[in-house]
Amino acid sequence: MVVGEQGRALNALTLPVAADSPSRRERQWSRYGAASVLTLGGLIVLAVSVGVAVTLGPADVSLVNVRDILLNHLGLAEIPVRVSEDAIVWQERLPRALVAAACGAGLGLCGAILQSLLRNPLADPFVLGVSSGASTGAVAVGMLGLGGSSLGLSGGAFLGALVAFGLVLLLARFASSGTSGVILAGVASTQLFSALTSLIMFAFADSDEARGVMFWLLGSLEGMRWNDVGLSTAVVGVGAIVCIASARSLDAFAFGEDVAASLGIPVARTRVLLLILTALLTATLVSIAGAVGFVGLVLPHAARLLFGQRHARVIPATIVLGAVFMVWVDAASRVAFAPTPLPVGVGTALVGVPVFVLLLLRRKGRA
């Protein structure tokens, strides 16, 4: 029997237990009941965070006014409010906060998937170049018209993310430095697709277009609308359902593909499904908000630190932490240099880069 936090997770996956035994029922509560309580508490914190974040900005809007506007639009009340305040909350700040929450949840989810599948704590869509590939695909469609109107920004970003991730896996296969080869391949992929994006902008964009694209590439939540909310939350919701259903498989992948196969998990099919899901999530969120970095790197580690290694708890914790984190980073970015907003990707990098360095030092200390 293996000891330690990861050992307990592996023992829970492998040790046979009678179907009606109390220990099995206790483990089921530990897996699903605790996750449900965590999710409910996290959603309450998220709702409060969104409500407070909506009040922040150049124009003062009280939390009471936010409540009244929400009740009016939900058809639960008819409370008189100013037209200007209604427009600020319902048409500008609330969609922006909800898209920020969806981006944080989705990118954190991508990081949790990649770190488990690749067995590398430094994996996330930004570090592996998937975000850069998605950015290149979106810029190629938007500025070059590749694929026409039938493809769209999300479709171009999805294809770019798939190409970038395929390139990373191909380069890592020929690397001689173990799991760190994936990170080195990701660095190479990031530089390549960043250069391609810059080349497209230099060759085909005027100064105004280039300025707008550069601001978007740094991560921008300006001009979010309710259709962006619907798309981002729908994709993240599907991703969350698939990942929660795959929690046991992700637990097994953390110990290697041989362990996962010995437990009866269809390794190849599960890996392909989760990697495609990661590319879809990354591509959709990049096409909406730009290349927001390091969220997928930081939040899964915070979730594991707080709630252990089991993905039945890590996944909902990462979703909630990522959503709350991005809501507050966006709020701070919006008011720090008001009235000029700071790109949200700058805020996430200021937090993510120090954590990335700490993880590198931690890995070196364990080597």
Image (spheres, rainbow, N blue to C red):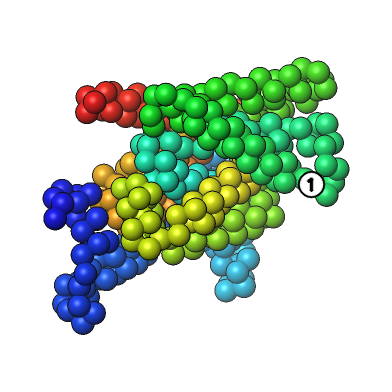
**Quarter-of-image position of residue 132:** top right
**Quarter-of-image position of residue 82:** bottom right
- Kind of residue sitting beneath label 1: Leu
Secondary-structure class at tag 1: helix
Please name the residue shown 14% across and 55% down the image. 1
Q: Residue 146, can we see it?
A: yes
Please name the residue shown 66% across and 20% down the image. 195
| 285 to the left or right of 112 | right
User: Is 315 placed above or below 187 here?
Assistant: below
Q: Nearer the viewer, residue 22 or 93?
A: 22
| 51 to the left or right of 145 | left
Residue 128 appears at what percent x and percent y? Answer: 51, 32
Which quadrant of the figure contains the C terminus?
top left
Please name the residue shown 23% across and 49% down the image. 6
| 354 to the left or right of 61 | left
Q: Nearer the viewer, residue 229 or 204?
A: 204
Please name the residue shown 28% across and 28% down the image. 363
Q: Nearer the viewer, residue 171 or 310?
A: 171
Residue 353 appears at what percent x and percent y? Answer: 41, 26
User: Is 287 placed above or below 139 here?
Assistant: below
The residue where tag 1 is placed is: 151
